[in-house]
Amino acid sequence: MTTDYNVIAEQYKQCKEHPWRARIETYSIMKRLGNLEGKKVLDVACGEGFYARKLRQCGACEVVGIDRSEAMIRLALDQESRHPLGIAYRVEDARTESARQEFDLAVSAWLLVYARSQDELLAMCRGLASRLKPGGRFLTFTGNPDLYAFTHADYRKYGFSITLTDCAYEGAPIVWTVYLDDSSFEIENYYLPMEAYETAFIEAGFHDFEVHVPEVSPHPQGVDDGTFWSDYLAHPPAVLIECVKK
Ligand SMILES: C[S@@+](CC[C@H](N)C(=O)[O-])C[C@H]1O[C@@H](n2cnc3c(N)ncnc32)[C@H](O)[C@@H]1O
């Protein structure tokens, strides 16, 4: 099964409402990005524009979103026409290399998980490098290859579950079942070991490769979350990777 975002675009948009998206995913990304003032930023695999809008609202002077799914870009453009933020969206594959090294920063939530092989990953990394200025930074929120060690992790209370193959191998499918109020849908990601990510980024011309675990934000109303997030944080299904283009 290959995930077709032209089919699940609306459902995917709904699942961005799950609390872990704001409390962990968005919080961790935005905290690590820091000050965006004056930065020209690319949201790669922008989907319906969730992060593109966030980046612009948080001070980036120019934001461009690219995604290979026409349906996702349509949803992003629809939001842009209803609530204009001056974001440009284009249907574009991250693996296509650009002649213009124009961005200070490239951000991507859930792109690298679509690389099924080291070659495909390298193509993505080269595509990212081709769009960044020298010294430009890349930050991504992506699947955690350590998932295979988390045999007892249960993410159902966060609105998803993950099904793995018996053992990890290059390109092994990792299936996320995402639960909405009255339906569910599946997203297929692919396994590559962390060393493959580091190797691909270095080969594509990046350095300072770092991996970070996600964090949970303080509750917006100061409510004590108790142990609710413990399972996620003890067995993070996602990590942040960042590196800098030479
Ligand atoms: C899980 S969605 C994430 C969307 C958005 N980043 C977010 O967090 O809401 C993954 C997106 O990656 C896009 N995608 C996958 N492979 C891609 C590629 N090679 N180039 C551009 N977009 C890609 C899909 O079309 C889809 O919209």
Image (tube, helix red, strand yellow):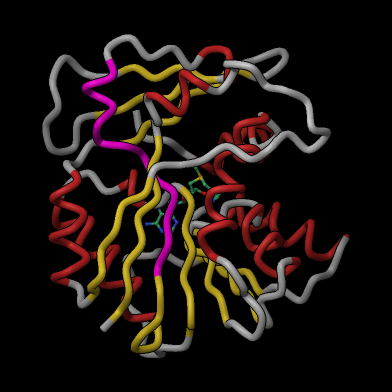
Q: Residue 1: horizontal and vertical position, in percent?
A: 34, 28
Q: Residue 226: horizontal and vertical position, in percent?
A: 64, 17
Please name the residue shown 24% across and 31% down the image. 146
Please name the residue shown 68% across and 82% down the image. 61
Please name the residue shown 88% across and 60% down the image. 82
Q: Please name whichever residue, 58 or 177, is drawn nearer the observer in this view of the structure.
A: 58
All told, the count of numbered labels is 0
Residue 21 colored magenta? no
Please name the residue shown 57% across and 56% down the image. 31
Q: Residue 124: horizontal and vertical position, in percent?
A: 29, 63
Residue 39 sits above or below residue 111 on the image? below
Horizontal relation, residue 214 to residue 127: left or right: right
Residue located farthest toward the right when viewing the structure as drawn: 82
Q: Quadrant of residue 157?
A: top right
Q: Please name whichever residue, 23 or 103, is drawn nearer the observer in this view of the structure.
A: 23
In the picture, the quarter occupied by the C terminus is bottom left
The residue range painted magenta reads 138-150
Horizontal relation, residue 176 to residue 61: left or right: left
Q: Residue 195: horizontal and vertical position, in percent?
A: 13, 50
Residue 89 sits above or below residue 224 on the image? below
Horizontal relation, residue 88 to residue 43: left or right: right
